[in-house]
Amino acid sequence: MNERLVSRYLFPLHERLKGKPTFRLLAELEASQWLPPRRLEEYRLRRLRRFLEFVHEHVPYCRALFDEHGLRPRSVHSFEDLGHLPFLTRDILQTRFDDLRARATLPGVHRRSSGGSTGTPVTVLVDMERMGMGEAGRLRAHRWYGVEPGTREIVLWGTPARTGALERVRQLRDRFLNTRVLSAFDMGDQGLRRHAATIQRVRPTQMFGYASAFHLVASHFQRERLDPPVGLKAVFTTAEPLFDFQRKTIEAALGCPVGVEYGCRDGGLVALECPSGGLHILAESMHVEILDPDVDGRGEIVLTNLDSRAFPILRYRTGDIGALDPTPCPCGRSLPKLRGVEGRRTDFLVTPSGRVLHALSAIYVLRDSPSVREFRVVQDAPDHLLVEIVPSGAFGEAEQAALRAQFVPAFGSDLRVSFEAREEILRTAAGKFRYVESRIAPAVLERLMQTGDPQGAITNDL
């Protein structure tokens, strides 16, 4: 489909028919990203007060909460005033769902559920204003890379095979919007060959999807010595952490920069990376706090979504670990930044002695092994790791012993490592891939954040 036709007419029409104010909000965001910090903060405070006034009037949970803690929306003078309120948790979302619904008529309210990769799936309500702001924030960030709405796009996503009239309608819509969806469930040898052939044929301007899936595609390009796609300006990764080794492979094999997107289905779109490397918070819509930061500023990310009127996301504990970055960005935008998002609490590992290690402590051992094509690490006890392996060659006792020895420097000699060979490692129900899952780390991290115990500080020393 002609890109100018899609950009100027079809895509705006699509958003308008859905009731999403995407392009009105995009125009606002294009201007607000360049506001001086003081004026940006004034703009955000006006939006905060409007949000608080609305939820106080229309949401029973918030009305009772504000009255109990003496918070008057019109008297809020800074985001620090939110500190008078307790945190919102997944348990509260589940047990107080009805009280969190807005008693007001809002456009296009519908349910949105998380995939449960944290162990606790939750459902929230979203309206078209929140949806439009998220889409506008994403479109603005894509423009940072010279990608306009309506350009040819490939989406690599957790899309199971579907049939029927509804699926034909989706495919027709995607065709008219210049979008081609490839399945992140189909990542075996044949699937990768099909994906690579589609990418070369479609010649997309941008690609969007899971970091792990694009890493596999890029590795296939390298193994098969395929030329980078012609005209590809950027790959945008979301839903999973992007590790440095993945970024290097994707950029080298596909011949373009990678931009990270961070968000969560229940909380909303939080931050997007610019070409200068700044992970900019969508500050017009999102306020970020760091709960109980350690000496390096890392702690749990807490969100307040100023567009979550249908179902307020107000001081919501995400379970993700990250830090703010106070340094100015070379790109010149005044939007605040995250220094990075290091993963969920379940993405960290714990040694038998009680030290907390980043997931990379195991990932680096396994990804450099010529015997390992794909892997997943599950920690089910403080002294035990189960490593699922898709072998790339021989994987007998000698190869396993060599890998066990490489875990010792970081984890100590008391760690037990078991290996299980697999023909394939399954994705989550949403199509995501998790290299590491610890069933031990969440409780340990909670204790460390509450006590500030320096003996258990998170380390990236590998």
Image (tube, rainbow, N blue to C red):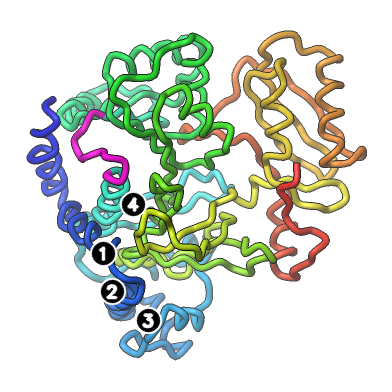
Inspect the image, locate mark 3, and give the three-letter code of the amino acid beneath it. Arg
The secondary element bearing badge 1 is classed as helix
429 or 363: which is nearer to us? 363
224 or 119: which is nearer to us? 224
Marks 2 and 3 sit apart, C-alpha to C-alpha, by 24 Å
403 w.r.t. 442: above or below = above
Q: Which residues are magenta?
A: 143-152
- Name which of mark 4 and mark 1 comes first in the sequence: 1
Q: Residue at x 14, y 40 (%)?
A: 11
x and y percent of residue 242 in the render?
Answer: 53, 39
Marks 4 and 3 sit apart, C-alpha to C-alpha, by 22 Å
54 w.r.t. 105: above or below = below
Residue, disc 3: 63
Q: From the viewer's perspective, is the residue at label 1 or at label 3 nearer?
A: 1
Q: From the viewer's perspective, is the residue at label 4 or at label 1 nearer?
A: 1
Inspect the image, locate mark 4, and give the three-letter code of the amino acid beneath it. Arg
Inspect the image, locate mark 2, and give the three-letter code of the amino acid beneath it. Tyr
Marks 1 and 3 sit apart, C-alpha to C-alpha, by 31 Å
- Name which of mark 1 and mark 3 comes first in the sequence: 1
Q: Residue at x 56, y 26 (%)?
A: 426
Residue, disc 2: 43
Q: Residue at x 74, y 40 (%)?
A: 379
The secondary element bearing badge 4 is classed as strand
Instruction: Give left or right: position of 197 versus 438.
Output: left
Whether residue 55 appears in this view of the structure is no
Image quadrant in which the C terminus is located? top right
Inspect the image, locate mark 1, and give the three-letter code of the amino acid beneath it. Ser
Residue, disc 4: 111
Residue, disc 1: 32
Marks 4 and 1 sit apart, C-alpha to C-alpha, by 30 Å
Image quadrant in which the N terminus is located? top left
